[in-house]
Amino acid sequence: MWRELLCQMLSDDIAVLTKFKPMRSEGEECNGPLCETTSTAESEVPSSSEGLNSTETTLLIPEHQVIDKRHQSKDSIFFRDGVRRIDFVLAYVDDLNKEWEKKLERRKEFERNLENAGLKLEREDKKESEDGKICFVKIHATWDVLITYAEVLNIKVPIKENDIPSTVENPLDCMLAPLRLPEKVMHPEPDYFTAPFSRDKQELYLINDESTFFSPSMRNRIVNYILTRCPYGTEEGKKKFGIKRLLNNGTYTAAYPLHDCQYWKKANDPNCENERYTLYMEWARFLRFYKEQPLDLIRKYYGEKIGIYFAWLGFYTEMLFLAAVVGLICFLYGLFTMDENMSSKEICDPAIGGEIIMCPLCDQDCEYWRLNTTCESSQYSHLFDNVATLFFAIFMGIWVTLFLEFWKRRQARLKYEWDLVDFEEEQQQLQLRPEYEAKCTHKKKNPVTQEMEPYLPITSQAVRFCISGTTVLFWIPRTHMEYENRLTMKMFLFQFVNYYSSCFYVAFFKGKFVGYPGAYTYMFNRWRNEECDPAGCLIELTTQLTIVMAGKQIWGNIQEAIVPWICNWWGRRKARNNPENLYSRWEQDHDLQTFGALGLFYEYLEMVIQFGFITLFVASFPLAPLLALMNNILEIRVDSWKLTTQYRRPVAAKAHSIGVWQEILNGMAILSVVTNAFIVAFTSDMIPRLVYYYTASENEDSPMSGYINNSLSVFQISDFPDRNKPKLNPENFVICRYRDYRYPPDHEKKYLHSMQFWHILAAKLAFIIIMEHVVFIVKFFVAWMIPDVPADVKAKIKREKYLTQKILYEYEFEKLKERLCQGGKQATEEEFITTEGRMELSRAM
């Protein structure tokens, strides 16, 4: 029976599981129907979570396990025996609604199958819970389960302590000492040579204690793998399986691994690692903002996927420091040269700007206005629209390349340090999504594994595409990796439009197609196209970015911290009155917020959207990197605080990179060169000023004097049609001015574009082409010059691979010699020669 259930839980490509045979360690009692001493009738007795009262439940527990709740602290991560670790917890509400019986049957079948798969279950009746409504099922993975699935999941484990010398110490380390964390926090475990686990080679691995050999994150990853594939029955003629479905249909309300202790104090249990407490004290407090992050401890506690996110976020923040310094210098240049700006001087001069009458900004109801009313905004515009802006736009095009290339190197180093060098995406691809398997009725041979596996025919894909539209393209991935990448790309594209559309509109469309007085452009012949602020569209774009980078980001961080805190405070309001020994560890974690499958997606999305703002539009706001730097220093601590204190412990997951986000960042880096070139050319006044300086200036002592008058065209008010003509003209103006390069009303080419307009347009297009080519050439040259993997990391990878192969071959060689000495019939001279040859080849390599 257990073999059949186990085969149902796993896909056909992991046939190694058929060798699994659940075993009990000495002194370990059995909780499931696999026990040989348990009769069939006893195995069918429902647990306390299935309707029995506390007294009946006690009768089912061995005598040595009957413990008085009042004398046992429940702030523990172990079963009642104090030995077996709680690797996962399931929770449900046992209420008598119309679907109660169906949910009860699902739970009974699901938990029975979990026990048949070798997991041990311990149940807590709802009367034991703080609110008297929630039942809990605690899950423990035995040694047999762990070693079986460790082989299935290709988990690497230590075989020998790493004896490769560490890199030479940096002479600046003494200066950076205040930023360092204690060595025990930064490197909680020794560095080992590792190899994929195999049940047949257990004596090869450094197994000092079976209960601690697999870390808690590895254990909860293994249990989660089982939970997502465990069947719970057949409904409507279809096989149903997986904890996700049971959570969606309300059979269970929660499924989560436990934190190892409370975050504000260490656990009383000496066997507890207290890693959550260490993370809170050394990482998740704002007062530690200047300290480095304990990435190894984060990875050990939360898994590589979350660890790589914080590594990326920290590296991004470090790189922002250089961009922030250069941006601040450019801003200060604009500030110190504000009084020397001839354009704003002329605008503010009553004899010049005060005498220039501007045409109304809307039809009929708007009035004529004097140019000097925009004096202040023209001065502020110079802060961001000056020669330094051009330099900063080119600098940021190069900076983004340096950031991405150096991140690849940092990521390569993490892959080596975190034992992910041989972690291939193919390993993840071979693990089909249970949801995909359930929808597939056809099978075909996998060319890699040579095993039959489910697949969706082209005809079925086409039908789904036609019925559901183009979005289906993103929703039929075959594997977890494909699903995550498609979902990430799809949601990012939606958010890209949502966040950036207004900035693109102001930068590239607003005020560009308005026509001219008397011949304005209308949308659908009804709505007149919007004009820019009198000071220009660049200052509007700067204002938008200021609001986003300063106000919106700060408010976002406040929301990220306050909302989960309030939810948890409200959820625990009753439990605060209970003594600690009655408020169990699983109940404490149950009352926390759920991080969710998309939790990390939204964290990445927030930072990548910010990355877009500081690269796509940075030519209009050099202070954007500085504001991003200040936000990210806070962001790291807010994210770490809420993850450590306000959320349930996420299930550990492996990842050797930031995934599809890398491609998104590369795409935005290329797009940023184009957008910044267009902003400088078409949104700012940089190119028109340069053209005037070199071709139209008539004053050698002050080349830019007269630029304002030159940049404004003349319109005769009597030429206004009734649709546009202002209702009031109290001062009887005859002409008004507008921003454009057109012939005056007395010219034979009245109101047509002048030659200066075409000269400026040609200069703008030439600038875009030159800037793009220069920046792209420098970008590609820098990317070519910087190798993706550091030389010392390459050498270490080769050295470790050689030493690991040598250890494995020597192990096989010794085992083979033992068999020969014992006269084993299975050992042959041919095997001996083959193994010896592989050892020689390894040495040669």
Image (tube, rainbow, N blue to C red):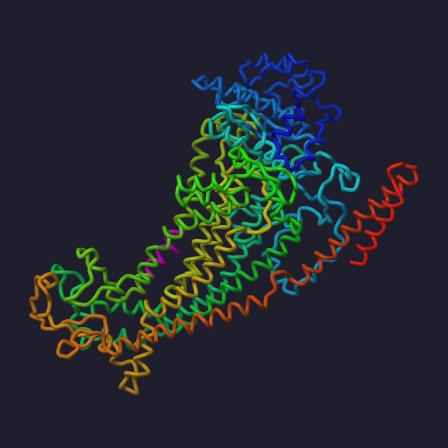
Q: Residue at x 10, y 70 (%)?
A: 719
Give the farthest residue toward the front: 459
Q: Where is residue 673 in the image (x, y as percent from the top left)?
A: 43, 65
Q: Where is residue 605 in the image (x, y as percent from the top left)?
A: 45, 49
Q: How many marks?
A: 0
Which is nearer the eye, 92 or 144? 144
Q: Which residue is drawn at 43% across and 18% down?
A: 97
Q: Is residue 78 visible?
A: no
Q: Position of residue 556 (x, y in %)?
A: 41, 48
Which is nearer the eye, 148 or 300? 148
Q: In which quarter of the image is the C terminus?
A: bottom right
Residue 312 covered by magenta stretch:
no
In the image, residue 572 sits, relative to residue 681, either above or below, namely above
In this image, 665 relative to 332: left or right?
right
Residue 545 covered by magenta stretch:
yes
Q: Quadrant of residue 144?
A: top right
Query: Which residues fall within the magenta stretch?
Result: 542-553
Q: Residue at x 37, y 55 (%)?
A: 500
Q: In which quarter of the image is residue 821?
A: top right
Q: Position of residue 511 (x, y in %)?
A: 26, 64
Q: Quadrant of the N terminus?
A: top right
In this image, 552 relative to 667: left or right?
left
Which is nearer the eye, 584 or 794? 794
Q: Quadrant of residue 344?
A: bottom left
Tell me which secondary structure the magenta stretch mostly adopts.
helix
Q: Is residue 443 visible?
A: yes
